[in-house]
Amino acid sequence: MLISDSDRLWLLSRRHPYELEMKMKKLLPILLILQIFCIASFAQESTATLDETLSWLKQKTVESTVPSFNPGGEMTLRNKSALFEGCFMSLTSVLTYKGDNVFRSEVSLSDLDETSIVVKSDRVASSGYKDPVWTVETWVKNKARLVKSVDEKFAAYPELQDHYNSIAITGFAVKEMANRYSKALSHAIKLCKQKEPF
């Protein structure tokens, strides 16, 4: 009769508890080393500069996203461009509904909370695709309304501009890319919060 490893371990614990205890003590140093290695790997920070990180974010904002559209299909939203001037981010999106409506979301990365970044499935955007579409969203510190949203048709009228407490980059077709984007965004926010050395 074959005995499984779990049954063998159970029998050993019943018949030779001291021997089992000694075996477990021998395993403890190995388990401790593995735990330290995992924590170190998880905590490892990127060494990319701010310019390198912003350049990558700018490219992936458009290159790695697909248009989002509502269940009826008559309205679509796509990322047109992402511009960075230092730590100032300007995300331009095009909402197509009875013509193109161009919106611009503007925020300083140093005002964002890198610990608030989430990657979530966008149910509305996913309705037009076989696989889920993902959104990366982050909030302003203390939920202050510091994200300025500008409809370019009314850009000359500040009183018509809206302000929000979060910014979302929609339309990631691959979750892995959304996760990578969120990590890069977090890194950029941290770098923007560092004080100038001189």
Image: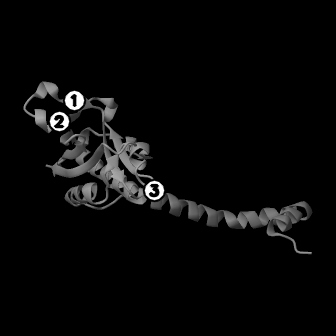
Q: Earlier in the sequence, mark 3 or mark 2?
A: 3
Q: Secondary structure at mark 3?
A: loop
Amino acid type of the residue that numbered disc 3 sits on in the rendered structure: Lys
The residue that appears at 38% across and 42% down in the rendered structure is 72
* Label 3 vs label 1, nearer the camera: 3
The numbered disc on residue 130 is: 3
Amino acid under label 2?
Val
Which residue carries the number 2 mark? 150
Secondary structure at badge 1 equals: strand
Residue at coordinates 74% horizontally, 63% vertically from top-left? 24
Residue 54 drawn at (x, y percent): 22, 55
- Mark 1 Cα shell of 10 Å, populated few (<14), some (14-19), many (≥20): some
Relative side of 147 to 17, left or right: left
Q: Position of residue 50 (x, y in %)?
A: 22, 56
Q: CA distance from mark 3 to mark 1?
A: 34 Å
Kindly check if marks 1 and 2 are in contact, taking CB atoms under 8 A apart as contact.
Answer: no
Question: Of discs 3 and 2, which sits in the foreground?
Answer: 3
Q: Residue at x 87, y 71 (%)?
A: 3
User: Which residue is under mark 1?
Assistant: 162
Per the rendering, the mark at residue 53 is none
Secondary element at tag 2 = strand
Q: Earlier in the sequence, mark 1 or mark 2?
A: 2
What's under tag 1, amino acid-wise?
A: Asp
Foreground of the two, 100 or 11: 100
